Image (tube, helix red, strand yellow):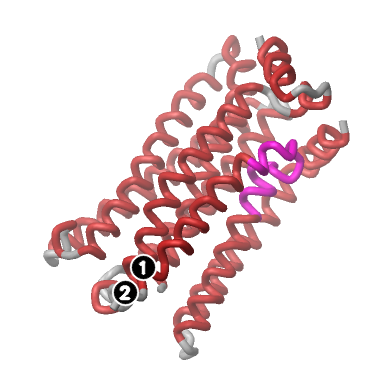
Amino acid sequence: MVGSIREQSAHSAGVPLDLRIWGWLVGLLIAGLTVFVMPIPRIAAIGLVFTAAIIKAALVVRKYMHLEAEHWLLYVIALAPVILIVIMAVALLPDIAFKQ
Amino acid sequence: METTANIQIATRLGGRDSIRKIPAARLALWLFLASEIMIFGGLISCFILLRIAHGGWDAEAAHVHWRIGAFNTLVLLTSSLTMALACTGAKEGMARRVRTCLGLTILLGLTFLGVKACEYSLEISKGLTPGAGLFWAFYYTLTGLHSLHVLAGIILNTTLWIAAGRMQMWSLVQRRIEYAGLYWHFVDVVWIFLFPLVYLS
């Protein structure tokens, strides 16, 4: 019930909210590109660029895909493969990346 | 039809609350998207691990056209906006806005593919084919697979755009546009990660 009310209010916010989210997405894209062309340490630049990417993805998923108003089960469905992939990558990292 | 499907899901989940919240089609679409996350996630994690193992592939990565990639990112982000506006329009029963926004989404998707094709031809003309090395094999696999998903989204949106022009199919469009939107936004999210991974790092 609470979810459906939240969903309705999200839809009634409609066009201005969608435009505001797009503004944030473009702003974050420009911020990422600015960091990329600036003369700062590479590791810091990569960290900032990926932080911007994660925020952008979270905005799209929560606002445009309306996941924030959805049932918890859909969060589990969406996050389970991400967690599995991170576990796989971390488990393989010592063998692949740091092999002598 | 929708009610029956909802009840089936509610029985499986064992809760009355779930009847309202998860229609069967939406649940199925999220399961499909989860399988897509596994496909792209597996490829992306392999790319990251092998890139670390091979010293970063800096020489190869210097040849990608990041300005073209940035333009394409802007195109896809804008297409997500038009798709979201189409979905909002459908919920408010505004058929004309739905058709306009869906049309814009299709055009932006085609722009993305056109720009990508030009980018590929630039790279291939320099001898940077999938056989030119591991970086390029990954580059073409990741971006090519993503482009195929964009193409699928364009086809899906085009069928809805045609249906939105017929009054008798309007209720069908209203139901299905949400799922087309979810798919399109997912394709956008994948590119949000591919762009810095391939072009900026």
| Quadrant of residue A8 within the rendered picture | top right
User: Could you tell me which residue is drawn at 78 percent across and 42 percent down?
Assistant: A10
Which amino acid type is marked by label 2? Lys
Find residue B45 and report its horizontal and vertical position in percent.
41, 59
| Quadrant of residue B5 within the rendered picture | top right
Range of residues picked out in magenta: A59-76
Q: CA distance from mark 1 to mark 2?
A: 6 Å
Q: Subunit of mark 2?
A: A
Please say whether residue A74 is one of the residues in the magenta stretch.
Answer: yes
Q: Which residue is mark 2?
A: A99
Depth check: A29 or A66 in front?
A66
Q: Quadrant of the N terminus of chain A?
A: top right
Residue B100 seen from this side: no
Mainly helix, strand or loop, the magenta region? helix
How many numbered marks have been drawn onto this rendered protein structure?
2
User: Could you tell me which residue is drawn at 50 percent across and 49 percent down?
Assistant: B188
**Are dots 1 and 2 in contact, CB under 8 Å?**
yes
Q: Viewed as shown, does residue B41 lie left or right of A16?
A: left
User: Could you tell me which residue is drawn at 77 percent across and 22 percent down?
Assistant: B14
